[in-house]
Amino acid sequence: MNLNLYLAQVNNINDPDKKGRIRVKIIPHLQEVADTDLPWAVPFSSSLSSSQMENDLPLVNTMIRVLVDNKWKRFYYLPNAYFYELFNFDNVSDKLPNDVSNKEYQYLSFKLYKDGGLEFHNNNSGDHGFIHKSGSYSIFDNDGNIKVDTKTSDMSIKCNGNTIESSSTSLIINGNLEILQ
């Protein structure tokens, strides 16, 4: 099967079959086609096995690349049509708090979300975390320690039905508290 590469605009990401497909408008070939008649494209590649799955759909109206077979029956999408123009590692490294042990580019797998949230994993140290758009974060460090900074005065943690709540002036524990040394 031969595949040809085209530029396309993401038209719809709400796959009725929930199989990771997106509806694409291939430019200029399908420019005048009604939205409901546009083809659905599947990811050209993804991390998928019996124990691993991902769903990382491009945003509607973004430009992507699409591979199409010669008979225009099969459609595969590739992300990052404008990779070099948009990729800026400083947008990620500037968000990482000092609690991250190694911030080097080659070790970080990450996703920076549209709302400013950042999920990351350091493939060298094992640090893994999420940084909220507010600056609050939770990190599992390379030793399995959990580091949390709420950047606000309120926090609530639940464990086996017990709740720990805190604010800038108090700490409330509902349930048993056991101090381990």
Image (cartoon, rainbow, N blue to C red):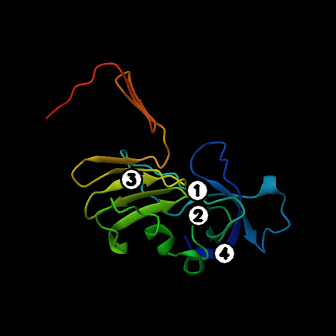
Mark 3, secondary structure of its residue: strand
Sequence-wise first label, 4 or 2? 4
* Residue 58, position as x, y percentages in the image: 61, 60
**Residue 103: percent from the left, percent from the top?**
34, 69
User: What amino acid type is highlighted by mark number 2?
Assistant: Tyr
Real-space Cα separation, disc 3 to disc 4, in angstroms: 36 Å
Residue at 72% from the left image edge and 63% from the top image edge? 61
Decide which of tag 3 and tag 2 comes sooner along the chain. Answer: 2
Q: Nearer the viewer, residue 78 or 84?
A: 84
Q: Residue at x 57, y 51 (%)?
A: 20
How far separated are the C-alphas under marks 2 and 1? 13 Å
Residues at circles 3 and 4 in contact by the CB criterion of under 8 Å? no
Could you tell me the amino acid type at mark 3? Answer: Gly
Q: Is residue 80 above or below residue 167?
A: below
Identify the residue at horizontal 38%, vertical 47% (top origin): 148
- Amino acid at circle 4: Tyr
Q: Position of residue 139 (x, y in %)?
A: 35, 51
Label 4 sits on a secondary structure element that is: strand
Quadrant housing residue 28: bottom right
Q: What residue would you read off at disc 4? A: 6
Nearer-N-terminus badge (3/4) = 4
Distance CA(mark 4)–CA(mark 2): 10 Å
Question: In the shown orientation, is residue 114 left or right of residue 178?
Answer: right
> For this view, does 147 lie left or right of residue 86?
left
From the image, tell me which residue sits under label 3. Answer: 129
Q: Which of 14/85 is in front?
A: 85
- Give the residue type that dot 1 points to: Leu
List the residue tagged with mark 2: 76
Dot in front, 3 or 1 = 3
Q: Which residue is mark 1?
A: 57
> Which marked residue is nearer to the observer: mark 2 or mark 1?
1
